Amino acid sequence: MATAGTAAKNAALLEAASRLTASSENLIDVNAADMDQARQEGITGPLLDRLELTPERIDGMAAGLTKVAALADPIGEVTEGWTFPNGIKASRVRVPLGVVAVIYEARPNVTADAAALCLKSGNASLLRGSSYALRSNLAIGAILRDGLEAAGLPADGVQVLEDTSREGARALMRAKAWVDLLVPRGGPNLLAAIEADATVPVVIDGAGNCHVYVDATADLEMAAAIVVNAKTSRPGVCNAAEKVIVHREVADEFVPKVAKLLADAGVELRGDAASQQLASVIKPADEDDWPTEYLDLIMAIRVVPNLEEAIAHINRYGTGHTEAIVTSDLNAADRFVARTDSAVVMVNASTRFTDGEEFGFGGEIGISTQKLHVRGPMGLRALTSERYVLRGDGQIR
């Protein structure tokens, strides 16, 4: 996989995209069996939604493969070059990581997205999904493997693991001799297991307890539209906003306005004492609410006296994913950006834009909430390393 040419990698992706579309009915039938099993096991709500394949989602997967094929190949890219005083020419060049393992829950589209990014960046992929998505993941994986073979590449460049047991996951986390990077995409239990058991290098695709802070100078119509979009457009994803922090100077006007809009959209509202006094639909929030990623139509609201208190709240309870400020004050925006410890910071925009597609990366393998070796949406370059190549003509030291 590391030595595969760009043309072959693109051919494999385009062939797999075509086969995904052609296999739509079969994939939906296979997925229906997974959905039935998930319901029997008590899976409901956003998690069940993530599991479902529809014609539109299959078309989206195929489009994702096509977009990755259209992206520039990062392998071989020279990121820096210079000449030593003795004439040796040095360059720093992007190379594949090797074998990338991904452990993920529920979403079959991750199978296509992760495999595509690994393939285009010259990596082999080991994909371990949930037990209740196994049929769907294997079917999608088979299509990707067929695409590889059709392009003259080894089918085992993409492997979907059939062992979905905890023991199997633990073995994968400890496979230092074979795995160069592990990307976990899942909930707190998975991340806790990774932190406890993993010995391979890991990039954490962590929780998204995302905030929107409405500043004293905010355009309140804009702020309301941003909050409603960030919460309701797709509440079960990591870039959905979970909390609204409101400056005291605009709280009397903004909290009742946004509370009505959110309640009308079916959102359960919880809040501090100040916000409860401004809207009767807001239930009391407790200390457990502030660090919680709901992944549901639930949102908590807090009123703060100033920007500094908003930043302090976010840095205490946030997960380093995405934070947003709505303001007309450039100085306030700059202070928020500089002092908020998060992978992505939005100014006057919805948190929902933290997404590999929106960033122009094609499908993403995850959104890193840590600081090494990558942070934020992870596209092709996040799946590469760099090495130095030195070319001389006989120099010795």
Image: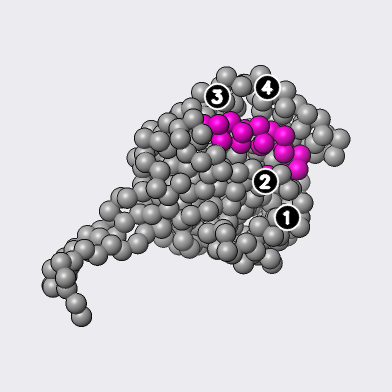
Q: Main secondary structure of the magenta part?
A: helix
Earlier in the chain: of badge 2 and badge 3, it is 3
Residue at the spot 16% in from the left edge and 70% down from the top edge? 394
Tag 1 or tag 4, which sits nearer the N-term? 4
Distance from disc 4 to disc 3, alpha carbons, whole Å, reads 11 Å
Give the mark nearest the N terminus, 1 or 3.
3
- The reply to whether discs 2 and 3 touch (Cβ–Cβ < 8 Å) is no
- Residue at 41% x, 58% y is 385
Residue 306, visible in the rendered structure? no
Are there few (<14), some (14-19), or many (20+) residues within 10 Å of tag 2? some
The picture places residue 138, in percent across and down from the top left corner, at 67, 36
The alpha-carbon separation of the residues under discs 4 and 1 comes to 28 Å
The number of callouts visible is 4
Q: Are marks 2 and 1 in contact (CB under 8 Å)?
A: yes
- What is the CA distance from the residue labelled 2 to the residue labelled 1? 9 Å
How many C-alpha atoms fall within 10 Å of the one at disc 1: few (<14), some, or many (≥20)? few
Mark 2 = which residue?
A: 161
Tell me which segment is drawn in magenta. Answer: 129-147
Check the image and report above or below for 117 versus 84.
above
| Residue ID for mark 1 | 168
Pick the front one: 269 or 241: 241
Residue 104: image x %, image y %? 65, 47
Amino acid under label 4?
A: Asn
- In x, y percent, where is residue 46? 71, 37
Residue bearing mark 4: 26
- Checking the image for residue 19, the label placed there is 3
Image x and y of residue 143, in percent: 58, 31
Question: Residue 270 got which mark?
Answer: none
Which quadrant would residue 265 be assigned to in this image? top right
